[in-house]
């Protein structure tokens, strides 16, 4: 019998399913946790979503996502902080401690990446007190550098840890997502550091498919379909002391076009073969 | 009058031109140096190519390229070393000191990136004595991490410098190519380090166009068309002590479809506006 007690399905993996369908699918498959995106929660309505998940006996491993903190103008910054405070409250309502932040890219027309990254640090400092008061951890997610310009100016785990350093580990953590970090020559050392600093808030698994999809956002794949070494990264994360949920988040058109129950079955099969033995 | 004394055109920028056409185009445009690729040299014939460039009074800023050193089997490794020794001799014949190495990606089906990177270090050690004897510098080029799996397992400037560290700076250097490194949160510090260690063998400029082209190799653009901050990176490279050639290397279908002389004129215009003031 395979042990799925740490497996969580991110709702983006079964994109065409409503939240109720994800919940039902996970219950039927014996998957004990989900990581919902805000859009699925909004569709269901926050209170109903929270009740739905709780009544089904599922955990919420994380909420995806806040972030997009890089606005250069005061109005944009105010709006971003309001959005993120709302997301913090949604995390509370959904009974998860972990709120992913995808921090955003350059402002329109901007070239000064150093200044833009400083704004990320500044907005993070603005948000931390509210997150702390509400018992929510802001999870800084380094994204693959191909998304630096338009999605996330946090490009490495080391950079995420540097950004987190001024704050309590219980309020600012980091995510290790195999798709985004597999290439990093510093990965082993930075995962060890993340463990020492008690910052690992999430371990997300999916593969990096080659060749890169024409829409590079959709190049994620089932574990085993791409180039990621799950055994090695899994051991590093385990040896760093992480024992929390392992969330599967895949953006991939072909997988989105597949029946959700089939997707869950494949995820479980790959997880049992490639992830579980090293976790 | 703009000063083009440090400008060099990489032959990939005018892909449809023969070497003779690149040489003629550069002479006519007042561009004093070129960076040929081996394919253009092979077409012309090595001796003829060397004479052609010399007779035109041009410098060869670098030769592109050796590398692809990651074969996992003995046969592939022997072949790679032979290819690279031949490229070293071609660099000598073309009277350039700088031979770019694009080191290659994972072996077919391989997942163990740590082992593959170790093979890069091992093959580099194999090549260094021959390069030194011939007065050629092996230029390690970090490529954007989106090419880690299939083109270059050197993904950051810091990693390139670590790989170079065991060897004399006159035999192993590094390239700073804005397209590949602009996103790196460690860039400033690693350029400073590269300067201190006398490793900067080439500064290549082109932009990183967004959105990323469907073929991600072709997402390079004219300076000014993408997200790269040439002023900041240019100052870092200058302040690190680099005063050599500045090579423009653009892979871009639209630019390849443009008349070569028009391309050179645009390159000169953008260079004068965005690169020269900070070099």
Image (cartoon, coloured by chain):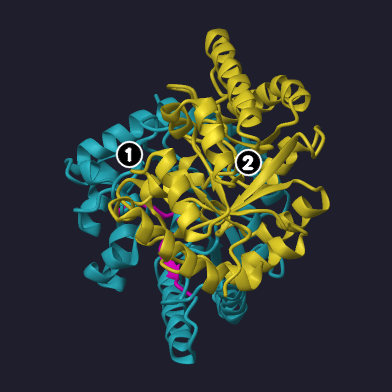
Chain colours: A cyan, B yellow
Residue drawn where x is 47% and y is 80% of the image: A71
Residue drawn where x is 54% and y is 13% of the image: B79
Chain identifier of the residue bearing label 2 in the image:
A
A16 sits left or right of A156 in the view: left
Instruction: Indicate the position of residue A228 as horizontal and vertical percent values.
Output: 47, 34
B59 sits left or right of B131 in the view: left
Q: Quadrant of residue A109?
A: bottom left
Q: Quadrant of residue B43?
A: top left
Q: Secondary structure at mark 2?
A: loop
Residue drawn where x is 63% and y is 70% of the image: B232
**Gap between marks 1 and 2 measured at Cα:** 36 Å
A150 sits left or right of A203 in the view: left
Report the span colored magenta: A56-69
In the foreground, A137 or A219: A219
Q: Secondary structure at mark 1?
A: loop
**Could you tell me which quadrant the N terminus of chain B lies in?**
bottom right
Instruction: Indicate the position of residue B105 as horizontal and vertical percent values.
Output: 50, 31
Magenta run includes residue A61? yes
The residue wearing badge 1 is: A30
Say if A244 sits above or below A223 in the image.
below
The residue wearing badge 2 is: A185
Q: Do marks 1 and 2 both belong to one polypeptide chain?
A: yes
Residue furthest to the front: B55
Instruction: Indicate the position of residue B168 as horizontal and vertical percent values.
Output: 82, 35
**Could you tell me how many numbered marks the image carries?**
2
> Is residue B117 visible to us here?
yes
**Could you tell me which quadrant the C terminus of chain B lies in?**
bottom right
């Amino acid at each position: 019998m395979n042990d799925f007690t740490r497996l969580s399905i991110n709702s983006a993996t079964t994109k065409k399913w409503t939240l109720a369908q994800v919940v039902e699918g996970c219950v039927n498959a014996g998957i004990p946790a989900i990581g919902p995106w805000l859009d699925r929660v909004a569709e269901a309505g926050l209170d109903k979503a929270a009740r739905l998940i709780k009544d089904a006996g599922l955990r919420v491993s994380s909420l995806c996502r806040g972030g997009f903190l890089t606005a250069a103008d005061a109005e944009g910054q105010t709006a971003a902080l309001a959005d993120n405070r709302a997301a913090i409250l949604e995390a509370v309502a959904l009974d998860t401690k972990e709120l992913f932040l995808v921090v955003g890219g350059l402002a329109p027309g901007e070239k000064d990446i150093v200044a833009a990254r400083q704004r990320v640090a500044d907005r993070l400092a603005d948000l931390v007190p509210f997150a702390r008061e509400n018992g929510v951890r802001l999870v800084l997610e380094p994204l693959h550098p191909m998304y630096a310009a338009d999605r996330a100016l946090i490009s490495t785990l080391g950079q995420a840890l540097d950004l987190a350093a001024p704050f309590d580990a219980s309020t600012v953590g980091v995510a290790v997502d195999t798709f985004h970090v597999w290439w990093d020559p510093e990965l082993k050392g930075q995962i060890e550091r993340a463990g020492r600093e008690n910052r690992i808030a999430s371990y997300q698994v999916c593969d990096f498919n080659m060749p890169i999809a024409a829409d590079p956002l959709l190049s994620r794949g089932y574990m085993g379909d791409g180039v990621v070494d799950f055994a090695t990264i899994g051991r590093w994360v385990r040896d760093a002391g992480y024992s929390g949920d392992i969330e599967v988040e895949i953006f991939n058109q072909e997988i989105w076009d597949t029946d959700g129950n089939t997707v869950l079955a494949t995820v479980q099969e790959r997880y049992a073969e490639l992830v579980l033995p090293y976790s």
